[in-house]
Image (tube, rainbow, N blue to C red):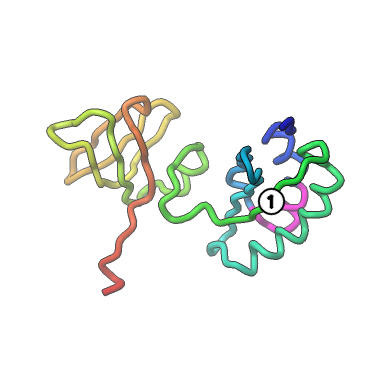
Amino acid sequence: MKIKTVEEIQNALQPIAEAMSIEIVEVEFKQGREPALTVYIDIEGGVDLDTCEKFHRAIDPVLDEFDPTFGAPYTLNVSSPGLDRPLKTQRDFDKCMGENVEIKLYAPLRGKKLIEAKLVGYDGNCVSVEDKGEVIKLEKSKIAKICRAIDFSGLL
C-alpha cells in the first residue's frame, strides 16, 4: 500500500493540534491486513479519553481530504503515548529533566543492565543521570530503552 510520509501527515494535522493546545508526539502507520494510522498526543495535565475523542473528530475530516493512503481503507487511532513511552526527542528529555528515569542497556555497566536514576543532562548523544550522588554519562548508542520511571509505591 502506498502512503504519504508520517511527516506529511503530521504537518497536515499540526494546525489542528496547535489550535487545540495538543502536542503530536508521534505519528505511526502500520501496514498489513488491517492498516492503521495512530496519532499519539499529549496535553498539559495529561491525555484522557475525552481529549482523544475530540482530537479524533477534529482530524478525521482533514485526513479524508488529505487522503494519506491514496484511497485505501485504514483505521484511525488517537492515543496517549503512555507512561512508559521511551524518551526519543529533545523535548521528551527536557520534560523529564530532574525526574527519575529507567534505563535498559545493551550491555552491563558495573554488572547491571538496568539503571534507575535522576536525569540530569542530555546533549543529543549522551544521557547524564545522577545515582547516589554520582553522575553517570551514557552514550545514547549503548541505551536499549530509556523511559520515565514509574513509582508505584504511593498506590498501595
Which residue appears farthest toward the front when viewing the image? 33
Which residue appears farthest toward the left when viewing the image? 111
Q: Is residue 22 left or right of residue 120?
A: right
- Residue occupying the point 36% across, 38% down: 145
Q: Position of residue 121 (x, y in %)?
A: 37, 37
Q: Position of residue 45 (x, y in %)?
A: 54, 64
Q: Give the vertical position of 86 relative to 49 (above or below).
A: above
How dense is the environment of label 1, judged by Cα within 10 Å: few (below 14), some, or many (20 and up)? few
- Residue occupying the point 41% across, 25% down: 125
Q: How many marks?
A: 1
Q: Position of residue 95 (x, y in %)?
A: 47, 48
Query: For the magenta stretch, what is the residue range?
Result: 15-22
What predominant SS class does the magenta segment belong to?
A: helix
- Residue occupying the point 30% across, 41% down: 103
Helix, strand or loop at label 1? It is strand
Q: Is residue 18 left or right of residue 30?
A: right
The quarter of the displayed image where residue 44 is located: bottom right
Q: Is residue 147 magenta?
A: no
- Residue occupying the point 71% across, 58% down: 56
Q: Pick the quarter of the image with the C terminus.
A: bottom left
Q: Is residue 97 left or right of residue 28?
A: left
Q: Is residue 17 magenta?
A: yes
Q: Is residue 81 left or right of residue 131?
A: right
Q: Pick the quarter of the image with the N terminus.
A: top right
Which residue appears farthest toward the bottom when viewing the image? 156
The quarter of the displayed image where residue 50 is located: bottom right
The quarter of the displayed image where residue 43 is located: bottom right
Residue bearing mark 1:
75
Q: Position of residue 102 (x, y in %)?
A: 31, 46
